[in-house]
Image (cartoon, rainbow, N blue to C red):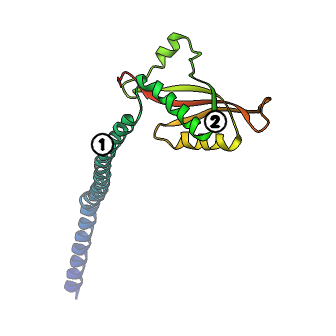
Amino acid sequence: MKRTSEKQRLLAGLISFVGLAAYVSYLYLLQPLGSEVAHLSQQVHDVAAQVRQLEQLIEQGHAIRREYGQLQAEVAQLRDRLPSEDELPSVIERLSGLASQTGVRILSISPQHSDQPPSAREASAPSAAAPYQAIAIEIDALSGFHQFGMFLSQVESGDQPVEVKQLRITQSTRELRRHTIRLLLLTYVTVGVGG
């Protein structure tokens, strides 16, 4: 019986040794490899996320290029609608014609001169990116309220972009049903393009 128990002890010792060897190899070999695999798996996941982000950015870049081309075409079309500096008298004639059609009597109409000194005007001169210039037109008129409303409606709904910057309406001292109107309009012309 002692032989069997020695065999059993030897077997138990062998099993313990194999178990200890397996544990040691796990600690020193397999565990670092497992953590390295987990680390590499995380890196692969991060790189895949970065690739997805880059693909989205590339797609956005294509969309931005398409949109930029469309905007350039739209800007060129809108620029063609602006009159040149040489056509400013025709803009004033158009405003006078609209006033006449709506029953507004213009007392004076003129482009407004800038209060800025020449150096400040040169510094704010349009660049190649914005080849247009804002021109203020001052109008003094005599009109009834409804006629003036029709005039403003036609001015603002025309092809020429016009913005009302200032408006002052006072009762006319000579005609009770009419008002004295001072109006400052802002319009735009292309710079350096002959008409």
Vertical relation: 51 (above or below) 144: below
Give the camera-side residue of 83 and 103.
Answer: 103
Camera-nearest residue between 127 and 22? 127
Whether 121 is drawn above or below 137: the answer is above
Q: Is residue 115 left or right of residue 124?
A: right
**Where does the image place residue 33, in percent across and percent down from the top left?**
25, 58
Q: Where is residue 60 in the image (x, y as percent from the top left)?
A: 32, 49
| Label 2 neighbour load within 10 Å: few <14, some 14-19, many 20+ | many
Residue 188, numbered circle: none
Q: Which of 49 and 55 is in front in this view?
A: 55
Checking the image for residue 104, the label placed there is: 2
Residue closer to the observer: 40 or 26: 40
Location of residue 103 with respect to 83 vertically, above or below: below
Tell me the kind of residue under disc 2: Val
Image quadrant for the C terminus?
top left
Task: Please give the name of the residue rendered at 27% of the width and 60% of the height, measured from the top-left corner.
Answer: 34
Of discs 2 and 1, which sits in the foreground? 2
Q: Name the residue under label 1.
A: 69
Element marked by disc 1: helix
Mark 2–mark 1 Cα distance, whole angstroms, equals 43 Å
Residue 97: x percent and y percent? 53, 34
From the viewer's perspective, tell me whether residue 37 is left or right of residue 129: left
The residue drawn where x is 32% and y is 51% is 53
Q: Quadrant of residue 86?
A: top left
Which quadrant, please, contains the N terminus? Answer: bottom left
Q: Quick one: SS at disc 2?
A: loop
Residue 79: which quarter of the image? top left
Q: What residue type is labelled 1?
A: Gly
Does the rendering let one see residue 170? yes
Q: Which of marks 2 and 1 is nearer the N terminus?
A: 1
